[in-house]
Amino acid sequence: MRLAMRLSVLLTASAVLAAACGDDDVTILDATRDDAATTEDRADSDVAFETFPDETPPDGAEADAGPDPGLDAVPDADADVSDVPDVPDVSDSSDGEVWTMPPRPDTDSPPAGVSWRYGGGCDYPDLVDPAWPIVTVVRTRAELEAALAAAAPGAIVYVADGVEIDLTGTTLHVPAGVWLAGGRGRDCAPGARLYTTETVRAPLLRVEGDDVRITGLRIHGADPDQCPAEWPDACTGDIAGDTNCRDCMPVSNGISVSGHDRLEVDNCELAGWSYAAVYVADGVGHRVHHNDDHHTQRQGLGYGVVLNGGGDPRTPIDADTAVEIAWNRFDYNRHAVAGSGFPRQDYVARHNLVLSHSIGHIFDMHGMDEQMHDGNVWAGRDIRVHDNTVLCDDQYSFVVRGRPATGAWLFSNCLARASAEEAALQRYYFGNFWVDRSPTGSAPNRYGRTAADCETVRWCTARGGAGPWRYLAASSTTLSTLALHDFDGDGVADVFRPNGSAWQWSRSGTSSWATLRAATDALAALGFGDFDGDGRTDVFRATGSEWQWSRSGTEPWARLNTSSYALGQLRFGDFDGDGRTDVFTATGSEWRWSRSGSSGWATLQASTAALASLAFGDFDGDGRTDVFRATGSEWQWSRSGTEPWARLNTSSYTLDRLAFADFDGDGRTDILSAQGNRWMVSWSGSGGWRPIRIASEPLSDLGFADFDGDGADDVFRTGCL
């Protein structure tokens, strides 16, 4: 069955629940007021949950009234409609038949080995087809705004694959019954990106009615950090009195829905939001599933999904707030899910993967007393946290800051925390909180577990560095013991390792280990290149008296050349563009090369540049390897290693902060740098820095090779879940 809300079966009598949950195998948290909490317990207990008025404009700005909700409104006769795309009329099909949308596939029972299981992405089965007749495809901000303004219920607005639209300074309004879609995960591509470069209170996407779906998009904010650089630790405006940057500057939401029902957010990458990636208030039937929700970690805030409303006595709205959160991947959040604590808030968090980087406890429900300071005991109504993998071992898995009106349950999870006492905490007012039990009976959590205990550890790749992570083979082998090359000549990189007695390879990184040949050489003693130009990677070693090669890594060692140069004195590239790998060295006075590794040394040019100060790539796309260096103020290159140094770009980034690969497949080497919580790329080394991904992995954890055969390099990682 498709993902469906499971919040309708609620047990409404807390006394009955307490009686039913009195078994000996159930951990019932202490029903006394917490007057002596530990430092960890109190880490954020004094931080008031901010009711986020997303309708409030930034200081000095006018309120955004949004679209006219009347479907029969007459447009301004003088309006410029030149940018309004045609909205398709599905009744006008060529064969006279009315088009019917295909049935949506099941996404609630993902097989264990599919890449989209947690967080959506590669090969997600519930993608919108932009060729459907109810779809309007847009490519610019003007087209997107116009299409949404014109969309009627049942319409789909599709942002074309690969498009990036800067929405800085605006909020998009998504009308009732409309889908806003992209193609994230189609052929493992990243899909369209909607982003802002400023942090303001207005959300990027505001839902304006019931039955909206937002799917297949990258939705990026401007604040992936715990504190922006201009507010490193504290500011005088912190309302909680804590030493953090919570209230130093405006906070941002990615998607906001208030007063409407049945929002579905799926297969999106949501990152860089200081307050919340998804904000829901005063509505039910919401589903947030199969999203990669990360880097929403502002100190004191930072919610992947946050609930508000649902019985807030300060507002005239009489509504519940209910959301189901499933099959998401969470990382670098303060809380993956939180509620403000009003007594008509319900959430189910199930089958989510929570990775190890969190600055606060994972699942949270505030209490009303924190909001009202009136002694009110309630903390939400019905909260169920089950069947999740939570790998953060230094934070509570679930904290409830009062007494849920119906109940809160933590059960059937795989947790890194060592015990129930370390995994769950209730504060201030007690009762109606059960650990190791579901509403129907015993359901123990598993405690003290590692990633490998809970999930299958794999290698993975991101297409072009920006795409969603694609699972490769199941393996715990780490990057430092691997090499990435194409040993069978099919245009797809393979994974290579020596195991002490043999060289092994995993074809395309997806097959189990197979033997290339028996050999005892360690990885550090080996070089790689295509010395015969057959499209297959060969293995190279230097013995001290000669260079030897193993053709395709399968044949016995054969002499390539006679030389006393050791491997550490050598670099490899194709300096003449003949498709064969050449050998390069720097003597201190000149650069030398050996054509195909088999000729005698010849001079490329006179140079005093040391070998360790050089990098290599093809920065002009002519098929010949160029030489690169970073001086501290600029990047320089020598075309084919034969021409004088010329400026490639102005940059203070030195060689140790850079990686080199062709991420867009244009035949030119690009330069990648990990800058805080962003990967930045300089196209061809001559362009300015542009974000390619919101991510925190350092360059040392990454490999680069083409794992899908599209001609562009992908990013490779180990230890993926």
Image (cartoon, helix red, strand yellow):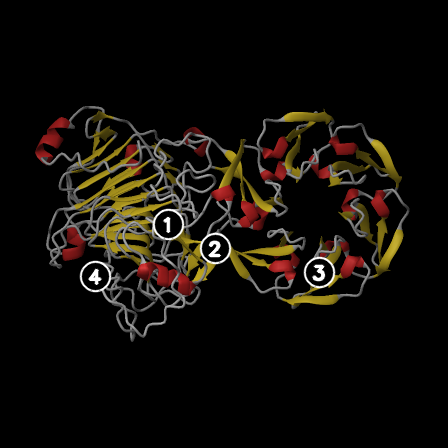
Q: Quadrant of residue 618?
A: bottom right
* Residue 167 in sight: no
- Mark 4 vs mark 1: which is more N-terminal? 4
Above or below 24: residue 34: below
CA–CA distance between discs 4 and 1?
38 Å
Q: Residues within 10 Å of mark 4 (few under 14, many from 20)?
A: few
What residue lies at 88% left-to-right and 56% top-to-bottom? 603
- Mark 1 vs mark 2: which is more N-terminal? 1
Circle 3 or circle 4, nearest the eye: 4
- Relative to residue 654, is residue 695 drawn left or right? left
Q: Which mark is residue 677?
A: 2
Q: Residues within 10 Å of mark 3 (few under 14, many from 20)?
A: many
The amino acid marked with disc number 1 is Asn
What residue lies at 25% left-to-right and 59% top-to-bottom? 52
Label 1: which residue?
333
Q: Secondary structure at mark 4?
A: loop
